């Protein structure tokens, strides 16, 4: 501030000297010093006033700048606090979503979590999840927060036709009427709309999209878009884990060639049925002359025969029946709450259906034989299995392509005359 006072004083002196210099008077005849001596009081007053003016101006400028900086700091702090609140809420929502999805053990449970989360994060917003089917060729609605209208009802038919899925990033469309808007937003029955679409990736493949609409020209607000992105990522991760686990469980529980239950899985499930006191029938099936079929037509034809027979068994069985490949060309079917006599009717359906399918397939013709036992013959699975196996051997000796009940066998293992077909 001192430098400004000095500068002001010098300027004041010069001005004072100029004002005291009369026209026609030579500067050399009257020095500035003499003029100062003559009029010292006005000069000092002028210097003081100039200095005070400069000081006041400088202080006013400094105060104004300081106030402006303070206002800017306050605004910045408020914006920072607002961002912190938003970030904290986003992180809290993500933690809750992660924890809820982690508890979901099935796809149905995970989708229910996603629906509830979106209802809370975006109340009133119509949000839907479209997922591709197993062939990845069609999209279908897997979840929606709009139960009444089942909206927003995006009509995109395949994953490859969805811009968000194809580009792999969240897209926002301010208006369905824009020339660069998504074509599937146009022509909605409720008129022009805006929309946000977030892609969903499962096990590294983008196979779904979270989609929501809003009034025309007013896209969904940023918190809704952020929540959708969070759900898209977390839902994709959880569905990937569930599907991978289910796939590993299926592989561990089924026969790789036929897709039927394997021996270990069948034994566990039958043991549970018997512990619960349920009556069951055990059907032991076997392809007739399978070794000859393999030797004559090759192992590839043999595998086709096994797959065809497996599919026939599965299609003829009820939902609650257990169908398994026991080993090689042997199959075991467990029919809960069924008698062995009723089981024979099942075997007859299988033989008839198999004969029909063979007329329409390239597989060499073959037949199958069955042996049956039920819990009236024994209460342990090992006993039922042995009895059914003996009945199957009797069916083979009796000419094959037939079903035999263990209860109709003589002590020597032969089929009673009245039970023979």
Image: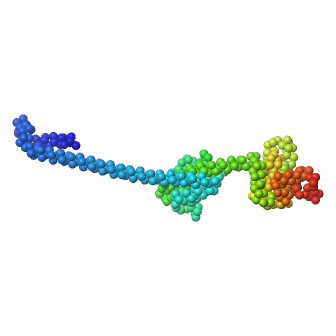
Residue 337 placement (x, y as % from top left): 79, 61
Locate residue 380: give its quadrant. Answer: bottom right
Asked whether the viewer can see residue 152, the reply is no
The single residue placed furthest to the top in the displayed view is 28
Q: Quadrant of the N terminus?
A: top left
Q: Measuring 55% from the left and 55% from the top, which residue is drawn there?
A: 211
The outermost residue toward the bottom is 148
Residue 284: x percent and y percent?
83, 52
- The residue sitting at 20% across, 46% down in the picture is 54
Q: Is residue 337 left or right of residue 123?
A: right
Residue 266 image position (x, y, % from top left)? 77, 52
Res 9 seen here: yes
Q: Point out the image quarter for the C terminus.
A: bottom right
> Does residue 264 appear to the left or right of 367 in the view shown?
left
Q: Residue at x 56, y 52 (%)?
A: 98
- Observer-nearest residue: 389 or 134? 389
Query: Percent from the top left, x then y, of residue 236?
Result: 59, 50
Q: Could you tell me which residue is drawn at 54 percent across and 57 percent down?
A: 118
Q: Quadrant of residue 347?
A: bottom right
């Amino acid at each position: 501030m001192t430098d400004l006072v000095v500068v002001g004083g010098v300027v004041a002196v010069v001005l004072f000297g100029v004002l005291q210099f009369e026209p026609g008077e030579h500067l050399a005849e009257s020095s500035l010093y003499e003029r100062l001596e003559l009029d010292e009081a006005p000069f000092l007053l002028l210097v003081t006033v100039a200095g005070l003016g400069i000081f006041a101006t400088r202080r006013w400028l400094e105060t104004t700048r300081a106030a402006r900086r303070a206002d800017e700091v306050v605004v910045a702090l408020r914006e920072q606090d607002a961002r912190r609140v938003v970030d904290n809420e986003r992180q809290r929502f993500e933690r809750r979503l992660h924890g809820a999805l982690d508890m979901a053990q099935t796809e149905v449970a995970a989708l229910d979590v996603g629906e509830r989360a979106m209802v809370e994060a975006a109340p009133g917003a119509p949000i839907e999840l479209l997922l591709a089917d197993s062939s990845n060729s069609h999209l279908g609605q897997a979840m929606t927060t709009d139960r009444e209208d089942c909206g927003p009802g995006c009509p995109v038919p395949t994953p490859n036709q969805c811009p968000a899925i194809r580009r792999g990033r969240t897209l926002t469309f301010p208006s369905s009427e824009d020339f660069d808007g998504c074509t599937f937003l146009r022509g909605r029955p409720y008129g022009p709309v805006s929309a946000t679409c977030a892609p969903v990736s499962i096990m590294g493949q983008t196979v779904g999209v979270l989609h929501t609409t809003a009034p025309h020209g007013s896209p969904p607000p940023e918190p809704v878009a952020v929540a959708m992105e969070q759900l898209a990522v977390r839902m994709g991760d959880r569905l990937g884990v569930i599907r991978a686990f289910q796939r590993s469980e299926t592989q561990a529980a089924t026969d790789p060639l036929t897709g039927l239950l394997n021996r270990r899985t069948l034994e566990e499930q039958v043991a549970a049925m018997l512990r619960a006191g349920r009556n069951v029938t055990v059907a032991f099936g076997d392809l007739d002359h399978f070794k000859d079929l393999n030797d004559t037509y090759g192992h590839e034809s043999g595998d086709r025969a096994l797959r065809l027979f497996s599919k026939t068994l599965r299609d003829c069985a009820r939902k609650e029946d257990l169908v398994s490949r026991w080993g090689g060309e042997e199959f075991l079917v467990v029919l809960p709450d069924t008698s062995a006599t009723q089981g024979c009717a099942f075997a007859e359906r299988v033989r008839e259906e198999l004969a029909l399918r063979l007329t329409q397939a390239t597989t060499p013709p073959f037949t199958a034989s069955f042996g049956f036992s039920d819990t009236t013959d024994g209460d342990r699975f090992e006993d039922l299995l042995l009895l059914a196996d003996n009945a199957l051997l009797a069916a083979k000796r009796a000419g094959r392509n037939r079903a035999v009940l263990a209860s109709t066998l003589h002590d020597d293992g032969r089929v009673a005359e009245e039970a023979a077909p």
